[in-house]
Image: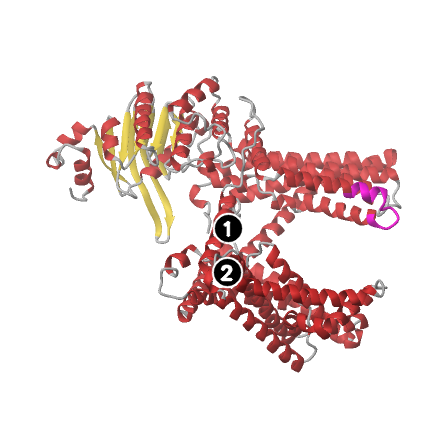
Amino acid sequence: MIAASLYIVVCSARNRLLMRLRRLREPRYFVGAIAGAAYLYFSVFARLRSAGGARRRRGAAAVPLALGSLRAGAAGLVGLLLLAVALLAWILPFDSGLLAFSDAEIQFLFPAPVSRRALLVHRMIRSQIGLLFGGVIIGIATPSISAYGRLRTGIAMWLLLSAGKVYFTGVSLARTKLASHEAGARRAAWLPLAALAAAALVVAASLYRAFAAGSPTSLNDLLERVAGATAAGAAGIALWPFAALARPIFAAGAAQYAEGLLASTVVLAAAIAWVLQTDAALEDSAAAAAERRAADAAAQAAPYRASRTSLSLAPFGRAEAIFAWKAATQTLRGVDRLAVLRVAVLVVAMTAAATTVGRGNGLRALAGSFALAMTGFVVLMAPQVLRVDMREDLRHLEVLKTWPVRAPAIVRGELVWPGVILTAAAWTALAIAALLAGPTLFARLRLSWLLSAAAAVAIIAPALIFAQLTIHNAAALIFPAWVPLGQQRPRGLDAMGQRLIMLGATWLLLIVSLIPGAIAAAIVWFALRIFVGPAALVPAAVVCAASVAVEVLLATEALGPAYEALDLTAIERVE
Amino acid sequence: MALEVDRFSRTYPAASGKFTAVDDLSFAVAAGEIVGLIGPNGAGKTTTLRSIAGILKPTAGVVRIDGHDIVADPIEAKRRLAFMPDEPHLFEYLTVAEHLRLVARLYGVGDFDRRAATLLDELELAGKERSLPGELSRGMRQKVVIACGLVREATTLLFDEPLTGLDPIGIRRMRNTIAARATQGAAILLSSHLLHLVEEICSRVIIMDRGRKIADGTFEELATRADLAAAGSNLEQIFFRVTGHGA
């Protein structure tokens, strides 16, 4: 069975790689791959190299003393965290995914003459590529002065992730056995839980003793006491399997690392042995996992719910309104209204708290900075994310093409709802930012400047949003193959590169589209500021926004022929 | 003529250059006529219907609906046309009633409420008005697509495999519905692999193979055609003879 598993793993990986390489023959994927590789190199490797060089120049002595002392007890601290997660796994319905056999696996392997243990081993082998990838990514992302250091971290993380995956699988199997009709099976399933609970009690008692004398005076004191209480004695023994998994990550030298790796491997082997002897519950657990997967798939396939109240569509009117109504209905049926309400309550509560009690302690400034960042995100990034426009509707092109509606009206209609909803979000974030950041971050600004600037941003924001939406929709019509449709999220370096190119092109076009408006706004500003002062920002913003609005209208008219010329065969279906 | 297709061709880009799905196809459908479009898989039937509906652009040739060119005058042509595709493409977030209302708004249907209620009854969709497509069976979704096509006064109706997914009662009702529309004066072009259906309700049949029209006429005309006389008198025998797949 191991040979068959390796065959499946190797063939799957090879075919996936070949498929990705084959699609590089298409220019868009080739260009995307170059852009993605360049981004990865410059954002990770080059940055790490320069950071490593700077660290070497500064020397090892520059490492803060507190961090050095912390490192000694770090394995114990992480072990404590792992113990908490291991306990939670019994309470919360964690799923490692190891028992989520694919439909093909169920069809081919379940009827095959292989043991349940062999099936588990097969799933463990199959999971290794993903775990290895996770380890490599963490290794690359971890700041280290050498490639060797990153390799060490990567291997240590791989072992930790593997042990976690196997452990969660064991919990899933044991949980199934807890409901077994056989008393012996139930007793066997209770054993690991009892052992874990006992270990947790021992560690908790030790921690209680460490903190009974008095509260910690600083963060360093807190960390040192935790490390001291969990490093030796009964607590040290109870925590050993968990600390052992973290030890290679924090090992100082090669010998310590090798010792840690050995201990970590022993823990992983023990976890595997436990899971393999719990294999009797495999079928039931696999069935439960399959049910959960089917429920998730069903929820994803039908993410909308028809509510009792709905927006009504007037029988006559402009064609643009049809698309706005359609997109609004989609949004309102797709989002969890309760979740939105919770977020709204949270935002209002935080704003109120920051306004009333946060003045002296910096909370107000912090919340104001956050609101400012949110405004920037909504205006500059959200049009890329919210895709209830042509990027969604190209999936329905077959239907749209039969409608007797002018193409420019369709393009305009597609922009209306996302533009309105993003403008509302931007204005909300801006109002909060003005309320919180105005008196703190911009305390030196006069009120007239502050109000004028806020009003100007409020006027410019919808123009920027609609301009970006126009660019995204134009890209969807002119280069449909470059734009993922609906919920499609193509994976791979090339797909990442494509997204980066699209983002760069969008911002470049946005800047170009702003130039005429910015020139006109500058003229208005210089002409009026002598008479009205900072308030001249407002008419300047109006002129700029009007210029962009005219461009958007012209662009939608110009995109009409692109929509008419768009062929169904140009739309890429789900990969 | 309600529907005219004149020297229509459509090609697709392919690895080996170009693939011709439909080649130099011409035919017409008069008001009140039901014409069956049949052929083996890959004959070009769906490409023809999609091009008539304005979904695909003809590579060559002209398609006119009530005299309006689907390429040069698409709005007026589409206003007179209803296309019922084989795959029910619905908006997953709109209910059945909202789909009908959307279509009514798009085509400016005046007495929408009355027509919608009648249609929902006729197609056995009454009680499903507030259902989303995800809550409906494939047959029900197909009926919604057909209801959307019939809720307006289209002069030309295109059906692509209209009976797919329907139960026997639904099939009978659909047959009656199609025949009733023709009686009311609509020109109907129907593509189906169900030859007995075509034989039963169509007044004329067009047989396509590998993108070309290889036969066009009433059953009597085809049955008496010199090269087909030996095939027999039913459509199935004629179909196999004319497409060269043996009887």
Q: Which segment is the magenta one?
A: A350-363
* Total marks in image: 2
Please, what secondary structure does the residue beneath circle 2 have?
Answer: helix
Can residue A523 be seen from the camera position used here? no
Of callouts 1 and 2, the N-terminal one: 2
Q: CA separation, marks 1 and 2?
A: 27 Å
Using residue A71 as the reference point, say whether residue B176 is left or right of it.
Answer: left
Q: Quadrant of the C terminus of chain B?
A: top left
Q: How is the image coloured?
A: secondary structure
Image location of residue A374, percent across then percent down: 72, 46
Left or right: A112, with A506 as reference point:
left
Residue under label 1, please give it.
Answer: A292
- Up-down: is A56 above or below A415? below
Chain letter for mark 2: A
Kind of residue sitting beneath label 2: Ala
Residue highlighted by disc 2: A183
Q: Nearer the viewer, mark 1 or mark 2?
A: 2
Q: Is residue B110 left or right of residue A204?
A: left
* Rendering coords of residue A570 (x, y %): 45, 45
Residue at image coords 60%, 58% = A90
**Which residue is more in the foreground, A482 or A226?**
A226
User: For the view shown, which residue lies furthest in the left direction?
Assistant: B230
Q: Quadrant of the N terminus of chain B?
A: top left
Question: Dot 1: what SS?
Answer: helix
Residue A495 appears in view: yes
- Three-letter code for the amino acid on which mark 1 is drawn: Arg
Displayed quadrant of residue A226: bottom right
Q: Is residue A352 magenta?
A: yes
